[in-house]
Amino acid sequence: MARYTGPVCRLCRRHGEKLFLKGDRCFTPRCSFDRRPNPPGPRPARRRKVSDRGLQLREKQRARVSYGLLEKQFVRYYKEAIRRPGVSGENLVRLLETRFDNIVYRLGFADSRSQARQLVRHGIFAVNGRKLDIPSAQLKEGDAITFTPRGARSEYFKIVQEGMRAKNPPAWLALDAVGMSGRVAGIPTVAQGETHLFNENIIIEYYSR
């Protein structure tokens, strides 16, 4: 599946806020957004008022970039969210949060979603005892995430193991820091998703027009 391969710090500057796309580096003085918070490119001669449609577009782009998705992928999640019963905005957050790579990131096995995606593709994680290397796989309540035997022998496993006790996953995930495993303990809600970065209802309005 295609993915964005450009400079990610540029995306934070474009959206005017930290999206924490580089993990721990975003909390250090080396963060590009802290050094250059202005948008990339030449500065406009005058500031123009952003239309309602423009604000909706920004909100959608912010969510898409946060989860590391391209437009075609994100539209599929929107279509699935409105197809399912219930509130479409909550369905969208649920679909994004239960992606395999996002859960690996949320459990603290990776510093960022891009790193989680790479680790999943390398096949060092298993779901319910079977290796799974599809980052977009949708996990459900009760699924257990562990390292594969190959992953448990890697140097990365030792590095992650040292800092696992400081990890604090959301309430819908259960983490066993000693056993280096995790479990989907419930269904993620809007309050437990990254709604501080985007408004899911505005995104639904954007695509509904």
Image (spheres, rainbow, N blue to C red):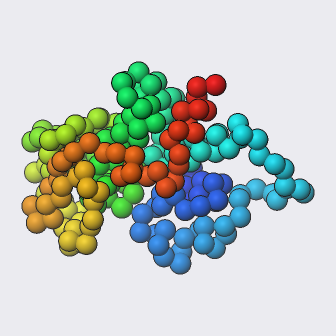
Q: Residue furthest front?
A: 86
Q: Residue furthest top?
A: 83
Q: Residue furthest right?
A: 45
Which residue is located at x 57 percent, y 39 percent?
A: 202
Q: In which quarter of the view is residue 83 placed?
A: top left
Which residue is located at x 26 percent, y 55 percent?
A: 171
Residue 136 position within the rendered picture, expressed as x and y whole percent measured from the top left:
34, 36
Front one among 162 and 18: 18
Front one among 21 and 140: 140
Front one among 160 and 96: 96
Can you say whether 201 is above or below 49 in the image?
above
Which residue is located at x 60 percent, y 54 percent?
A: 11
Q: How many marks?
A: 0
Residue 9 position within the rendered picture, expressed as x and y whole percent measured from the top left:
57, 60
- Does any portion of residue 31 appear in the rendered image? yes
Can you say whether 176 is above or below 30 in the image?
above
Whether residue 77 sits left or right of residue 6 in the image: it is left
Q: In which quarter of the view is residue 53 placed?
A: top right
- Does any portion of residue 4 appear in the rendered image? no
Please state, as top left, top right, bottom left or bottom right, where the N terminus lies in the image.
Answer: top left
Residue 31 position within the rendered picture, expressed as x and y whole percent measured from the top left:
54, 70
Which residue is located at x 29 percent, y 35 percent?
A: 137
Whether residue 161 sits left or right of residue 25 in the image: it is left
Please state, as top left, top right, bottom left or bottom right, where the C terminus lies in the image.
Answer: top right
Whether residue 90 sits left or right of residue 65 in the image: it is left
Residue 207 position within the rendered picture, expressed as x and y whole percent measured from the top left:
58, 28
